[in-house]
């Protein structure tokens, strides 16, 4: 029997990244992305949304040019419906609705956090992993149980990526702080005292940013970056280990933009080894926000006729991972 793989167009636009991709089944056909970098300070929601509004038509034109078939071949349009910044989500939803109406193809509302997880399950050998999802806007320990992705632990305040970026700004490093802190941390060796917060399987990062900021006049930048990574990543590793030992999952999957960090990968891999589990990380080029993950999740939802009407396509800025009924996993 010949199986026909669905062709899905995916739009990601929850915060800083405008990205469009076309996939056929598990295969990436075309992928384009553009990322907003604030002139100063953190991400400004209105500025980021204006960036997305400008970039989506450009990216879409590139996609159409490079696509080896006509856009009419697409079976459905998937978009990141939430969670994320309201103004950004509205731009993304508007373009997805317009293309859906233009091509007369169904619309699929994808949960952004779940898309990071699904991508990892597709492109790594992880089948039913304990997921540590670490990004600019979210930090969660997620695993699948009884029809839903359950959140076992999460940040009680800001995400780890946000914490790294805001410390980076305080240290005068360029945006985004995450990769620059990783680079500086490699030259640090003195472990400075910082608060270590873990509550059950949840963690908190805003206090440690403030505490690290107070060290700036007394210590060198490399030692501050090194210490900050050691403390915050150790909290993530401890919570991951607890979650893994409770659930006895046989693998850990690291996903989200901060998954690119080699020190974090090293620590989480150690946890996996201790617990006799396999360790997988999403490759660096797809760790951060991207349209591929939205399109790939769209394929799974399409196969279950999990569509929404334009009327149901209102954005969901606070849409939680565990609110989604996952129809595509048995
Ligand atoms: P996302 O929101 O998933 O696109 O991830 C963006 C976040 O990933 C930002 O906060 C970045 O600072 C962070 N990030 C990217 N590369 C690294 C890295 N090598 N180490 C730590 N954080 C990183
Ligand atoms: Mg993300």
Image (tube, rainbow, N blue to C red):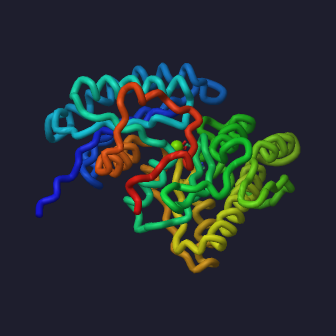
Q: Does residue 190 appear to the left or right of 14 in the view shown?
A: right
Where is the N terminus found, in terms of image quarters? bottom left
Q: Is there any visible trace of residue 95 in the rendered image?
A: yes
Across the whole image, how many numbered discs are drawn on residues?
A: 0
State whether residue 100 is above or below residue 287.
Answer: above
State whether residue 82 is above or below residue 215.
Answer: above
Q: Position of residue 188 (x, y in %)?
A: 73, 56
State whether residue 31 is above or below residue 119.
Answer: above
Q: In which quarter of the image is residue 178?
A: top right
Q: Nearer the viewer, residue 305 or 291?
A: 305
* Residue pictured at 46% horizontal, 27% vertical: 314
State whether residue 11 is above or below residue 230.
Answer: above
* Residue pictured at 42% horizontal, 60% vertical: 121
* Residue pictured at 35% horizontal, 48% vertical: 301
Q: Nearer the viewer, residue 146 or 7?
A: 146
Q: In the orientation shown, which residue stands out farthest toward the left?
A: 1
Q: Nearer the viewer, residue 152 or 226?
A: 152
Q: Is there any visible trace of residue 32 in the rendered image?
A: no
Q: Position of residue 212 (x, y in %)?
A: 81, 45
Q: Does residue 159 appear to the left or right of 322 in the view shown?
A: right
Q: Where is residue 330 in the image (x, y as percent from the top left)?
A: 40, 63
* Residue pictured at 32% horizontal, 25% vertical: 58
Q: Does residue 257 appear to the left or right of 271 in the view shown?
A: left
Q: Does residue 267 appear to the left or right of 115 in the view shown?
A: right
Q: Position of residue 162 (x, y in %)?
A: 65, 40
């Amino acid at each position: 029997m010949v199986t026909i793989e669905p062709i899905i167009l995916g739009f990601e636009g929850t915060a800083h990244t405008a990205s469009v991709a076309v996939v056929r089944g598990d295969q990436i056909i075309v992928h384009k992305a553009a990322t907003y970098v604030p002139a100063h300070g953190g991400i400004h929601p209105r500025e980021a949304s204006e960036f997305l509004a400008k970039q989506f038509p450009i990216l879409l034109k590139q996609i159409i040019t490079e696509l080896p078939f006509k856009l009419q071949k697409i079976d459905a349009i998937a978009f990141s419906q939430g969670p994320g910044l309201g103004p950004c989500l509205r731009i993304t939803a508007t373009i997805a609705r317009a293309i859906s109406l233009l091509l007369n193809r169904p619309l699929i509302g994808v949960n952004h956090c779940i898309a990071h997880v699904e991508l990892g399950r597709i492109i790594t050998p992880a089948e039913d992993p304990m997921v540590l999802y670490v990004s600019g806007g979210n930090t969660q320990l997620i695993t699948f149980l009884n029809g839903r992705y359950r959140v076992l632990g999460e940040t009680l305040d800001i995400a780890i990526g946000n914490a790294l970026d805001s410390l980076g700004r305080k240290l005068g490093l360029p945006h985004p702080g995450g990769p620059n802190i990783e680079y500086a941390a490699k030259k640090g060796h003195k472990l400075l005292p910082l608060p270590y917060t873990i509550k059950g399987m949840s963690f908190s990062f805003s206090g440690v940013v403030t505490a690290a900021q107070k060290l700036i006049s007394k210590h060198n930048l490399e030692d501050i970056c090194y210490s900050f990574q050691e403390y915050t990543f150790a909290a993530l590793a401890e919570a991951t280990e607890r979650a893994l030992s409770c659930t006895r999952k046989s693998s850990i999957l690291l996903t989200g933009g901060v998954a690119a960090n080699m020190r974090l990968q090293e620590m989480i891999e150690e946890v996996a080894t201790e617990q006799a589990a396999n360790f997988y990380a999403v490759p660096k080029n797809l760790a951060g926000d991207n349209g591929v993950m939205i399109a790939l999740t769209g394929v799974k939802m399409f196969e279950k006729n999990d569509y929404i009407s334009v009327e149901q396509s209102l954005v969901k800025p606070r849409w939680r991972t565990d609110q989604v009924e996952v129809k595509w996993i048995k």
